[in-house]
């Protein structure tokens, strides 16, 4: 079966066009193909299908075979895939994932998509809907003790749950491999969580490192960058338009601060290579 390896800021997935075909066991394929030693290698796989409520459907699996509701870097790459491969000639594309529809405007250079701006929808801030178990209606700057240290977290859902933690030093020096799993599997998160560790550089720039549920550390997380920007704005640390600096690259995020308004994310989408594999 033909595939394409793509990444957004280093957040890499294996993409399959299943608009006219199917993969028998998608979860098992994700586990096998994501392995960086014995498979193609990636943070998971993304399957592109015909949309029911949108132009296309994105079916995303993490490296551990669990289904993901949304992937901000992945949805940009899906938009690039369908345009570059001639599945559409639109430069404004709608893509659904687990029922939620995102709207993407692509920037085309020399016949190929260079970058994409995504309407990620309004952030979910009610704790019970993220979900996170806290006493307050919202989880903004609330304490959580992990491995004997008290952290202050702000929780946001961008279609998937995020716990955003602001730290004083660079995230590059943070013991993510130890603390990340302890956040992901903490009992206050009924569906586990993605966790972003953020240093505020100034009101227009955040430095971010992320531990993604089901995948571990990734070089970038689009929904995580959106959640981090929302959290920074809610806590008064940042302006409404800012840049999130990730290990794999930069994402531009904007949000008005109004609960009902969409978060917009702009960033690159890159094709690495095409190939074919037996499934």
Image: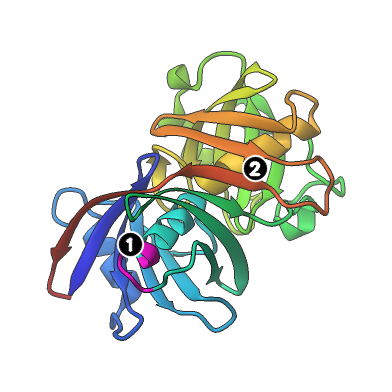
In-image side of 271 versus 118 (left or right): left
Label 2, label 1: how many angstroms apart (C-alpha)? 29 Å
Read off the residue under disc 2. 227
Q: Give the magenta part as a residue range.
A: 82-87
Q: Residues within 10 Å of mark 1 (few under 14, many from 20)?
A: some
SS class of the residue under badge 2? helix
Q: Nearer the viewer, residue 101 or 128?
A: 101
Please say if 121 is above or below 249: below
SS class of the residue under badge 1? helix
Residue visible at 31% across and 86% down in the picture: 20
Does the rendering let one see residue 142? Answer: no
Residue visible at 33% across and 79% down in the picture: 18
Residue visible at 54% across and 56% down in the picture: 105
Residue 203, horizontal then vertical, whole percent: 70, 20
Q: Nearer the viewer, residue 237 or 125?
A: 237
Give the quadrant of the N terminus: bottom left
Q: Quadrant of residue 155?
A: top right
Residue 93, magenta (yes or no): no
* Residue at the top extreme of this rendering: 169
Residue 204, horizontal then vertical, whole percent: 66, 23
Residue 40, horizontal then vertical, whole percent: 18, 56
Q: Nearer the viewer, residue 177 or 145?
A: 177
Q: Quadrant of residue 202?
A: top right
Q: Quadrant of residue 242?
A: top right
**Mark 2 or mark 1, whichever is nearer to me:** 1
Q: Earlier in the sequence, mark 2 or mark 1?
A: 1
Residue visible at 42% across and 32% down in the picture: 249
Read off the residue under disc 1. 84
């Amino acid at each position: 079966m033909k595939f394409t390896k793509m990444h957004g800021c280093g957040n890499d997935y294996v993409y399959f066009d299943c608009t006219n075909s199917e993969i028998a066991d998608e979860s098992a394929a994700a586990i096998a193909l994501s392995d960086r030693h014995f498979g193609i290698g990636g943070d998971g796989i993304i399957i592109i299908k015909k949309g029911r409520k949108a132009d296309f459907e994105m079916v995303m699996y993490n490296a551990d075979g669990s289904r993901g509701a949304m992937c901000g870097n992945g949805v940009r790459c899906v938009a690039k895939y369908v345009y570059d491969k001639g599945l559409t000639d639109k430069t404004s594309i709608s893509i659904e994932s687990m029922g939620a529809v995102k709207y993407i405007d692509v920037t085309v250079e020399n016949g190929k998509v260079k970058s994409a701006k995504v309407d990620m929808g309004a952030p979910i801030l009610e704790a019970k809907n993220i979900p996170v178990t806290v006493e307050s209606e919202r989880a903004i700057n609330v304490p959580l003790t992990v491995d004997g240290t008290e952290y202050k977290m702000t929780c946001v859902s961008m279609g998937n749950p995020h716990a955003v933690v602001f730290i004083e030093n660079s995230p590059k020096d943070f013991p993510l491999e130890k603390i990340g799993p302890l956040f992901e599997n903490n009992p206050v998160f009924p569906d586990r969580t993605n966790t972003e560790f953020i240093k505020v550089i100034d009101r227009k720039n955040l430095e971010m490192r992320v531990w993604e549920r089901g995948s571990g550390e990734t070089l970038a997380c689009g929904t995580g960058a959106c959640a981090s920007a929302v959290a920074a704005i809610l806590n008064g640390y940042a302006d409404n338009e800012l840049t999130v600096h990730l290990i794999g690259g930069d994402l531009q995020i904007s949000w008005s601060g109004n609960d009902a308004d969409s978060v917009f994310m702009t960033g690159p989408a890159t094709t690495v290579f095409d190939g074919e594999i037996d499934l």
